[in-house]
Structure formats: structure tokens, C-alpha cells
């Protein structure tokens, strides 16, 4: 029986190959989108356990806060350390689109305590103390920039910003490793010197001693600055990331809708093929029923064939995605640090293929099973 | 009556086309004794194929009763009929209707896939059936690599592989040249004499009909007997 299904599937070789390929391409696309969605989720998840909170201007992330808030936030109960940051958003001059790095100007002193989930190369923070233009770069980011731009530790590099008009020149002192593999950290006092505009903070990181104190700290900080000239909004790292992501437009929903459209497309391609196949085999199905095959068995054979074809498509499409989006192999140019095929992404791709096979085969199979043997045979004459 | 293999009693068959109903067979009764080789003749549209389909249980009469090998098949459900069919009848078509992607061997094996036989047992049955039709050496050939006559013999092997008591053939020589037709008819005769198969064969060709032991004419839904 299995051999019959296999041979039937390859009856029209070109058609089967084309169907498998279009299912494969669509499933590859779908896998890519699923990876994108799950990478966002994982980023948020990794932030979920963090003890850090973010204080920013209540109106928008694009408004600055006064530097004097640093000490005031540090004085709030349960806050252990505070760090003022400016998101600089580094790009390489002339190659604005090719390499993305989340370049951040930050107060140097609190760095080690604040970023305890990062591993800094030994001594690199000390070196930064002695070098105003010093910077530490994520290991993965350096690897990419080395390939494309020839960056090395010890080199001075020029970066531009999508926000600020001045360029900065950073001396790469060492590397770090942590959740964000595209990070570049440099001294905020250097940025102030370049801009000639001191005392402005983009947002504050604050560390809280225990997770259960996070809501209290958020409330207290915002209460402290209520009715001041610069009111604040303090939230968890996870919530901050979420609002930061949604600033880039609601891409997630768009991706999700495109994903659904892709699934619908695969379904139509597969259903069309199977409908054609069923029509061609009308007589044959009648002959097989003359030999004693039941309606049910004919339907099962036919649906199996449809599932086989779409699973072959999945093997190529989802399999390709698994090979390509391997952890450590692929990082979407730094945009999405968790861009990998997780087991659940892979399973989703395979389930979609299974579902497509079943649905695409079902309608023609039911029609074939319903047709009377006599009608099927009459098509010969 | 104990040696009657098939008993058709008062069978009427109407086909509804749109709102009109056409009567193809009217109160037809027929007894087919065991070991009979019956040729069914008659003008086109007289209902020969219809009668054959009723005997094979792939169509149901509007009224009347059909009994084959002691079993009344009228009114049986689809599953039971399919099972009955796979054991009791072998069907031979005018256009052979082999499955093009399967070899001769695999085509003959097809009905056996519905049984619980092991692969080795199936092999034995298939080779035996191919041997009877004289095509053991063609078992690996695909239908397109066979002549029309050979294809029809493979189809006959497929029909006899489950060792059914009743063979039904609808114009089995209708698409063959004289020589191939002769071979096929000789084969059917041998199946009837040597293997005691009861055969009902629809044909337009008087020479083919002459090979049967009995000829019946179907006209306007009624049977007229003629001596063979
Ligand atoms: N499914 C059907 N629906 C409507 N009419 C049918 C159907 N099947 C058969 N008929 C009609 O029944 C009549 C008998 O058909 P049948 O095929 O049994 O004839 P036949 O004797 O086999 O003819 P031929 O020698 O041409 O094969 C024909 O008039 C045909 O049009
Ligand atoms: Mg006919």
C-alpha cells in the first residue's frame, strides 16, 4: 500500500516536484516569520527575569531627563544602583543599512553592577576609565564588523547616529558577552563632550534589590517626579522593551497576517494539485472499487498521498530553515538576537504541512469516495 | 437449483436523468449455473453493461433480487459489498484499466493487498496467475511496455488472482486485433473448462460469442435465448 501511495505521488513527476517546491518555499517563508516572532518573544522573556527597571520621560523616549535625577532615583528605597544612558543607535558611516548595533552611551561607574548578566573581558572596564573614547563591543557584533569592515580591538572606528548629527570616534578596548549580541557601550561623558550639551539623560537604568520590590520602586520614582517639569515613566525591562519594539510600528501583527496569508497560499496550491489528480484518477478509483477497495480506503490512500507531498515540501522548506537559522550561525544582521528555529517553531511548520496535506486531500477524496463506481467507469466510454 | 451460481429475479433498473426516468431492464430474470460461460449480446444501449454491473454489485437494481454464490447482494451495504466483491468476482474491462505506474506484477497483486496474505504468499499467487495467462516473463513490465493483448491478459490475471467464482467481462476483446482477441478468448475458455470459473461476457462480436457455452440476447430490457 505504501508503495502504491509513493508511486502514485510521483506519477506526474514535474507537477509533484513543482508542488513540493512551492510548499517548501512557502513553509520556509513561514518558518522565517515564526522565527522572527519567537525571537521577539524570547527577547522579552530573557528580560522578564531582570531586576532592572527603566525610567524615561513620561511623554516619550525622545525627550531628555535632567542628570540630577540620578541621585534622586538612587535614594529611593530598594534601589541599589542607577545608571544614566543615551541611546545613540550606532551605524557605520556610509553603510547605514548594512550593520546594526545598539550603541549606548552610559555612565561608566555603575556598569559592572548594572549589567551583571553580561560578561566583560577582564580589565576592559578599567581601561575605559583611562580612555574617554573607549568602547566595549559585544563579541558577536565585533565578529560581524570584522568580516565586513575589518574592525579589531585596538582600532578607532567612526560611527554615525540616526538621531544625533555629530559623528563619534570610538577606540575599541575589548569585548563583552550577554543577551544582546549587538551592543556597543561607550562613555556618556564622551558623548556630552562631542555634543557640547551636558546634563541630558535619555533614560535611567535602576537596579532593584528584590523582584517583589519592582512595582513599588516604579511607583515611588514616578511619584517623586510627579508635577515636576519632567515627569517620568518607570517600568520593568520587559515592558520597556515591548514599548521600544512597538515604536518600530506594529510589525508583529503584520508578520502574523502575512504568515496566515502564506498558509492560505500553500493550501490553495496543494488543493489545486490534488483536485487535478483526483479528476485524472476518476476511472482508476472506480476500477479499484471493482477490485474490492472500499470508499474509505480509496479516500485514505488519496489523503495519504496529499499528506506525503506536503510533508516532503516541509522536509525541504522547514528543514532548510532549521539548517540555516542555527543558533550562533544566523543572527539577522544583529537585529534579532534570538533568530533561531526553536523546537516549537519547527513543530509548527510541520503541523501546518500536515494540516495542509489533510485539508487539500480531503475535499477531492470525499468527492472521489462519493462518486458511484458506475459513474466512474462510464467516464471511460 | 443447487448448482445455480447466480440468480437474477425480477430485476428492474431505472436510471433517472434530470426528471425523466428511463427503464433499462424490466422484470428480468436469469439463472446462471455454476461453470457456465455465458455470452451476453444485444444492441448498444440495451443494458448489457448495466446487467453486468448489477451482478458485480457495483450498481443496485431499482427492484428485484440478485443472489450470487448463495449470498443475496441486493441491499448490502457498501463495506460488505466491497468485501464480497473482492472475494467473489473478477472484473475484466474493455480498456484493460491497468494502473500505469504499477508493473504487471504489482497490478496483479493489487486485489491481494486487501487480504491478510503475507508478501511471500502474495508472490506465489501473483506468479501463478501470471503463469496461467502466459506472462510470467513480463512481470516487471509496465502496462505501456505491453501490447493490448498482453495488457488484457494481465488484467485477466488480476481478475483471477483472488480465485473468484465469477468472472465478469465487458467487451474484453472490443479493443483488440483478431489474433489477440483469439488468445484472450482461448484463455477465457480455458479458465472456464480447466478452472471451472463461471464467466459472463458481454460482446458485440458473434465470433467471440461463439466461444461461449450459451448466448443470451438482451433487447429492450428483456432476455432472448439463442443456442450457442
Ligand atoms: N448512470 C446512468 N445514468 C443515466 N443513464 C444511464 C446510466 N447508465 C446507463 N444509462 C443508460 O442505460 C442504457 C443502457 O446502458 P448500458 O451501458 O447498460 O448499455 P450497453 O448495452 O452496455 O451498451 P453498449 O453496447 O453501448 O456498451 C443506456 O441507454 C444508457 O444511456
Ligand atoms: Mg456496455
Image (tube, coloured by chain):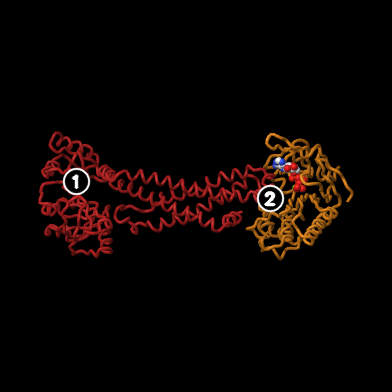
Residue at screen point 85% across, 49% down: B215
Give the crowd class for mark 1: few <14, some 14-19, many >=20 residues within 10 Å: many
**The image quadrant in which ligand 1 is located:** top right
Residue at screen point 20% across, 56% down: A160
**Residue B133 rendering spot, x and y as whole percentages:** 76, 60
| Rendered position, B73 above or below B129 | above
**SS type, badge 2:** loop
Whether residue A80 appears in this view of the structure is yes
Residue at screen point 51% across, 54% down: A19
Q: Which residue is mark 2?
A: A380
**Residue A162 rendering spot, x and y as whole percentages:** 21, 51
Q: Chain of mark 2?
A: A
Chain B visual colour: orange
Which of the 4 image quarters holds residue A155?
A: bottom left
Chain A visual colour: red
Rounded to the nearest angstrom, the CA distance separating label 1 from label 2 is 79 Å
**SS type, badge 1:** strand
Amino acid at each position: 500500500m505504501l508503495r502504491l501511495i509513493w508511486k502514485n505521488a510521483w506519477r506526474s513527476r514535474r507537477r509533484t516536484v513543482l508542488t513540493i517546491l512551492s510548499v517548501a518555499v512557502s513553509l520556509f517563508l513561514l518558518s522565517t516569520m515564526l522565527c522572527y516572532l519567537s525571537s521577539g518573544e524570547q527577547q522579552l522573556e530573557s528580560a522578564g527575569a531582570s531586576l532592572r527597571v527603566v525610567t524615561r520621560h513620561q511623554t516619550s523616549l525622545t525627550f531628555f531627563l535632567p542628570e540630577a535625577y540620578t541621585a534622586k532615583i538612587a535614594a529611593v528605597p530598594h534601589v541599589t544602583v542607577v545608571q544614566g544612558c543615551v541611546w545613540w543607535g550606532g551605524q557605520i558611516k556610509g553603510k547605514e543599512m548594512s550593520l546594526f548595533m545598539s550603541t549606548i552611551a552610559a555612565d561608566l561607574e555603575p556598569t559592572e553592577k548594572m549589567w551583571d548578566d553580561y560578561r566583560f573581558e577582564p580589565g576592559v572596564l578599567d581601561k575605559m576609565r583611562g580612555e574617554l573614547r573607549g568602547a566595549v563591543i559585544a563579541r558577536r557584533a565585533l565578529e560581524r564588523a570584522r568580516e565586513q569592515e575589518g574592525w579589531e580591538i585596538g582600532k578607532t572606528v567612526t560611527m554615525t547616529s540616526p538621531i544625533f548629527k555629530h559623528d563619534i570616534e570610538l577606540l575599541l578596548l575589548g569585548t563583552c558577552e550577554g543577551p544582546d549580541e549587538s551592543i556597543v557601550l561607550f562613555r556618556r561623558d564622551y558623548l556630552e563632550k562631542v555634543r557640547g550639551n551636558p546634563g541630558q539623560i535619555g533614560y535611567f537604568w535602576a537596579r532593584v534589590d528584590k523582584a517583589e520590590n519592582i512595582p513599588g520602586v516604579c511607583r515611588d520614582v514616578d511619584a517623586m517626579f510627579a508635577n515636576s517639569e519632567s515627569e517620568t515613566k518607570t517600568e520593568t525591562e520587559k515592558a520597556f522593551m515591548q514599548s521600544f519594539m512597538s515604536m518600530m510600528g506594529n510589525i508583529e501583527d503584520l508578520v502574523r497576517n502575512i504568515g496566515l496569508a502564506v498558509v492560505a497560499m500553500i493550501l490553495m496550491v496543494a488543493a489545486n494539485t490534488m483536485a487535478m489528480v483526483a479528476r485524472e484518477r476518476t476511472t482508476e478509483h472506480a476500477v479499484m472499487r471493482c477490485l474490492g477497495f472500499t470508499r474509505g480506503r480509496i479516500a485514505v490512500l488519496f489523503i495519504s498521498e496529499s499528506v506525503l507531498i506536503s510533508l516532503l515540501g516541509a522536509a525541504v522548506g522547514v528543514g532548510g530553515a532549521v539548517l540555516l537559522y542555527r543558533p550562533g550561525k544566523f543572527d539577522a544582521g544583529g537585529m534579532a538576537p534570538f533568530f533561531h528555529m526553536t523546537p516549537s517553531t519547527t513543530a509548527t511548520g510541520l503541523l501546518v504541512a500536515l494540516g495542509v496535506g489533510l485539508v487539500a486531500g480531503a475535499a477531492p477524496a470525499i468527492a472521489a469516495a462519493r462518486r458511484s463506481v458506475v459513474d466512474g467507469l462510464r467516464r471511460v466510454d | 437449483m443447487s448448482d445455480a451460481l447466480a440468480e437474477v429475479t425480477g430485476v428492474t433498473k431505472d436510471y433517472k436523468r434530470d426528471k425523466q426516468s428511463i427503464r433499462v431492464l424490466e422484470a428480468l430474470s436469469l439463472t446462471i449455473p455454476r461453470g457456465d460461460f455465458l455470452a451476453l449480446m444485444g444492441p448498444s444501449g440495451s443494458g448489457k453493461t448495466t446487467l453486468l454491473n448489477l451482478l458485480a454489485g457495483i450498481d443496485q437494481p431499482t427492484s428485484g433480487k440478485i443472489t450470487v454464490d448463495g449470498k443475496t447482494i441486493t441491499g448490502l451495504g457498501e463495506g460488505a459489498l466491497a468485501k464480497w466483491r473482492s472475494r467473489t468476482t473478477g472484473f475484466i474491462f474493455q480498456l484493460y484499466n491497468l494502473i500505469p505506474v504499477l508493473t504487471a506484477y504489482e497490478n496483479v497483486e493489487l486485489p491481494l493487498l486487501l487480504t491478510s496474505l503475507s508478501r511471500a504468499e502474495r508472490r506465489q499467487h501473483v506468479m501463478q496467475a501470471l503463469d496461467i495467462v502466459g506472462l510470467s516473463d513480463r512481470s516487471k513490465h509496465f502496462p505501456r511496455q505491453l501490447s493490448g493483448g498482453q495488457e488484457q491478459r494481465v488484467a485477466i490475471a488480476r481478475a483471477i488472482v483472488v480465485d473468484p467464482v465469477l468472472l465478469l467481462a465487458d467487451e474484453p476483446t472490443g479493443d483488440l486485433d483478431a489474433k489477440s482477441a483469439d488468445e484472450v478468448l482461448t484463455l477465457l475458455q480455458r479458465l472456464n473448462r480447466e478452472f471451472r470459473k463461471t464467466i459472463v461476457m458481454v460482446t458485440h462480436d458473434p465470433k467471440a460469442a461463439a466461444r461461449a457455452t450459451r448466448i443470451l440476447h438482451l433487447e429492450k430490457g428483456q432476455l432472448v435465448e439463442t443456442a450457442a
